[in-house]
Amino acid sequence: MSALIPASQSLPALVTAAGQGAVFAAQEFFYGKIRNPHTRRAYQTAIQQFLDWAGGQGTELSRITPMLVGLYFDRHPGSPATKQQHRAALRHFFDQLVTRHVCLLNPVSTVRLERYQVTEGRTPEITIDEVRQILAALDLTTIAGLRDRALIGFLVYTAARVGAVATLTLGDLYETGGRANVHILEKNGKSREIPLRADLARWILAYREAAQLTGDVTPLFQTLQGGELTGRGLSRVDACRLVKRRMKNAGLSPRLSAHSFRVATITNLLEQGVALEDVQRLAGHADPRTTRLYDRRPQVITRQIVDRIGI
């Protein structure tokens, strides 16, 4: 039987030094409570960095104080957003240690950082003309071109995250009432059903027929080798690289990414007067404030004001 914890993901020295209770609590936290692998890696990095630093100060896990946490963040080289993320990771981690009676109190809960408020997301928006530019550059006589058109179509016309699109199977596509639909499993286990536009449904059908894809568990979007599909589904990283490559081939800015399609779709719907709650539902956001972060309409107002400066 393989080890419970891979050697590459061993626990921090302060945790192992604190005994089996601390080890159990940390393993439960990382591998039992955190199911998203990206969140797990980010939390492991933040917690490892802090505990390595704290260990260098000659302290023990159960003796870490709010003062020590505050001094750590005074020296933290990250941006305000990174500091907030790391503080959140540490707070949740020490909550677990308190629950399992490894620590008496959570030393992070009373530590405050500089105020950081996000009013607009950092992902750049791709324009309608740029999307058309990418699609026009695809060679639709190849499986790669048909596959990539269908994948980009999903990103544009469903506003789904690239990770959710990459992992679709043929079984996720179905028809009800003569209308094509897709079942999408988003992050945090959110399950959503989204109707497909007629043109996107045609793109998917053209790709499926050319690739001769069958079987409900067959990955819809697969890697290629020698111009042929391998049967292995794309990972999120594969899909992001694919989109970046297509953007580069179309001569677009390297700042754009697969997430830029999501920004463009949300902004476009809000520009047309679609209700915020309807756009929020399509995007799969739990909070309308998150949807507003994708709205790039305020940027246009800012440019108009700046352009009127008469200096």
Image (tube, grey):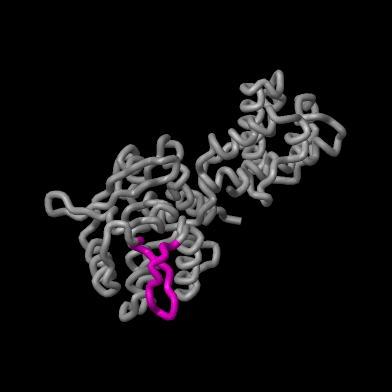
| Residue in front for this viewpoint, 133 or 45 | 45
Q: Kindly report the secondary structure that dominates the magenta region of the rendered protein.
A: strand
Relative vertical location of residue 198 with respect to residue 25 in this rendering, above or below: below
Farthest-out residue, right: 58
What residue is at 33 percent from the left and 41 percent from the top?
Answer: 281
Residue 115 appears in the figure: no
What residue is at 40 percent from the left and 79 percent from the top?
Answer: 227
The spot of residue 170 in percent (x, y) is: 29, 59
Residue 223 magenta-highlighted: yes
Instruction: Look at the image and give the residue range highlighted in magenta.
Output: 219-234
What residue is at 62 percent from the left and 27 percent from the top?
Answer: 96
Side of 80 relative to 131 (left or right): right
The spot of residue 191 in percent (x, y) is: 34, 42
What residue is at 70 percent from the left and 30 percent from the top?
Answer: 20
The spot of residue 125 in percent (x, y) is: 46, 57
| Residue in front for this viewpoint, 275 or 286 | 286
Q: Quadrant of residue 169?
A: bottom left
Q: In which quarter of the image is residue 80?
A: top right
| Residue in front for this viewpoint, 58 or 276 | 58
Side of 61 relative to 184 (left or right): right
